[in-house]
Image (spheres, rainbow, N blue to C red):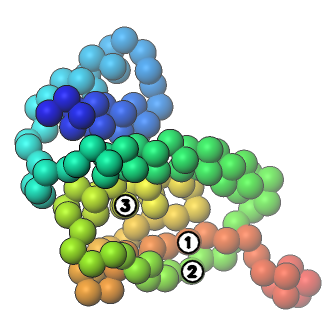
């Protein structure tokens, strides 16, 4: 229970980008009021890997934001990103969050048989810049 509330609170703080006392209180309230898990139990190792992934994606998000400011990204691509079979709803949410938190990508849809439909923005290709 404590690990679930802590994970929810961390995600809240990442989404809001504010660690002020009021926002921390609101985030804790939201974390406590959200309904229970939909999937099975998460083991400690899976939760540790999930938190590690969240902490690794934060610098990537800042790097991508800086790249987009310095070099405009005008190309758009939609691809399907494969997903491991039989993912729990919690891990599907976490995957979606990790993909969407970076500025160059957003999950448009999740198809159980195929994976995540992801929209990417990219800098113009070399051939397009010369034209």
Kindly state the secondary structure of the residue where label 3 is placed. Answer: helix
Q: Secondary structure at mark 2?
A: strand
Residue 121, x across and y down, in percent: 61, 70
Image point 35% across, 39% down: which residue? 11
Judging by the rendered image, the residue that carries numbered circle 1 is 120
Extreme residue toward the top, this view: 21
Residue at position x 24%, y 34% in the image: 3
Q: Position of residue 66 (x, y in %)?
A: 72, 48
Q: Nearer the viewer, residue 10 or 126?
A: 10
Q: Residues within 10 Å of mark 3 (few under 14, many from 20)?
A: some
Q: Which mark is residue 95?
A: 3
Label 1 element class: strand
Is residue 22 or residue 95 the one in the foreground? 95
Whichever of labels 1 and 3 marks the residue nearer the N terminus, that label is 3
Crowding at mark 2 (Cα within 10 Å: few <14, some 14-19, many 20+):
few
Horizontal side of 89 relative to 96 (left or right) equals: left
Q: Quadrant of the N terminus?
A: top left
Q: Are marks 2 and 1 in contact (CB under 8 Å)?
A: yes
How far apart marks 1 and 3 lie (CA) works out to 15 Å
Q: What is the number of the mark on residue 15?
A: none
Q: Are marks 1 and 3 in contact (CB under 8 Å)?
A: no
Res 30 seen here: no
Q: Mark 3 against mark 2, which lies toward the viewer?
A: 3
State the separation of the CA atoms marked 3 and 2. 19 Å
34 with respect to 121 (left or right)? left
Q: Outermost residue toward the right?
A: 130
Rendered residue at 62%/44% (across/down): 59
Quadrant assignment, res 103: bottom right
Residue holding disc 2? 77
Q: Earlier in the sequence, mark 2 or mark 1?
A: 2
At a point 32% along the width and 86% down the height, the residue shown is: 114
């Amino acid at each position: 229970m404590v690990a679930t509330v802590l994970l929810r609170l961390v995600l809240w703080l990442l989404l809001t980008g504010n660690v002020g006392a009021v926002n921390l209180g609101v985030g804790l309230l939201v974390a406590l009021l959200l309904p229970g898990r939909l999937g099975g139990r998460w083991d400690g190792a899976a939760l540790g890997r999930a938190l590690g992934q969240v902490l690794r994606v934060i610098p990537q998000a800042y790097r991508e934001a800086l790249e987009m400011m310095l070099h405009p990204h005008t190309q758009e691509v939609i691809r399907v990103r494969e997903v491991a079979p039989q993912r729990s709803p919690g891990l599907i949410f976490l995957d979606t969050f990790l993909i969407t938190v970076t500025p160059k990508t957003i999950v448009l849809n999740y198809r159980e048989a195929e994976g995540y439909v992801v929209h990417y923005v990219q800098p113009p290709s070399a051939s397009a810049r010369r034209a």
